[in-house]
Amino acid sequence: MKRIITIMATLVLLLAVLIPMPVSAAEPVDGYYHYIGPWVWNTQIMGGSWQAPSGVFEVIDLRSIPEMSQKGGTPGLGFFISSTPITLQGYRLVGRRFVDEFPQAVRTLLQTRYGVSLPSAEIYTTRGLIWSLFVEMGDPTGEARWRPLVAEMDGTLVINLSGYSPVTFIKDTPRKSPGWGWRWKGKWERKWDFKYHKWVNHWQYFKQRAWR
């Protein structure tokens, strides 16, 4: 009996080594295409159905519950990720990577449709946009817009997306207004140490005026 158990355990270990495990996909060098735009109502399916545009392989839903439930009519929005450009009307290109800054047209679209304010000094990258939309601007009831997601203890928001490793979204660091300011710099200085009567290297900090 012990011999049989030993043989079975050995076979399990061999299978674990020989069978390749799936790995997380790496983002292409040029990134994917990130769009915000409407869902598509497909009448070819019996009863009709909301679908993502052709070519989209992942989506973050931005619809309210009523928008999800309605049959036809004015479509809700989604954050669509595609490997090819979407040429249909009504889609705003957010960027190719999550670190990209998104254009003013995206702010206008979300402001007009859902009444969310996206101050440019506080929210400007795609990563910060997704974090702010789902952590700060969601509707707990789901009646007016998407429901919020709960951030991790460290303040990050982790979402598993096809075509990526799990993506960590963080809040953007507020931008400072352009202008003159102070910044700390440092340099090595050679000074005479009167106590030990020798030359020593000393790291000296100083403030410098700089344009920020």
Image (tube, helix red, strand yellow):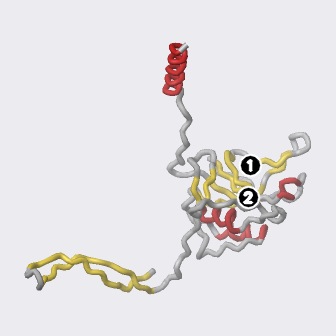
Q: Residue at x 77, y 65 (%)?
A: 139
Task: Residue type at mark 2: give it.
Answer: Gly
- The residue positioned farthest toward the left in the image shown: 197
- Which of 211 and 181 lies nearest the eye of the viewer? 181
Q: Nearer the viewer, residue 205 or 100?
A: 205
Q: Which residue is mark 2?
A: 37
Residue at left offset 78%, top offset 67%: 113
Q: Residues within 10 Å of mark 1 (few under 14, many from 20)?
A: some
Left-right relation of 66 to 205: right
First along the sequence among labels 1 and 2: 2
Query: In the rendered image of this protein, does residue 33 appear above or below residue 129?
Result: above
Which quadrant of the figure has residue 47?
top right
142 over 53 or under it: above or below: below
Q: Which residue is mark 1?
A: 53
Report helix, strand or loop for mark 1: loop
Identified by mark 1, the residue type is: Pro
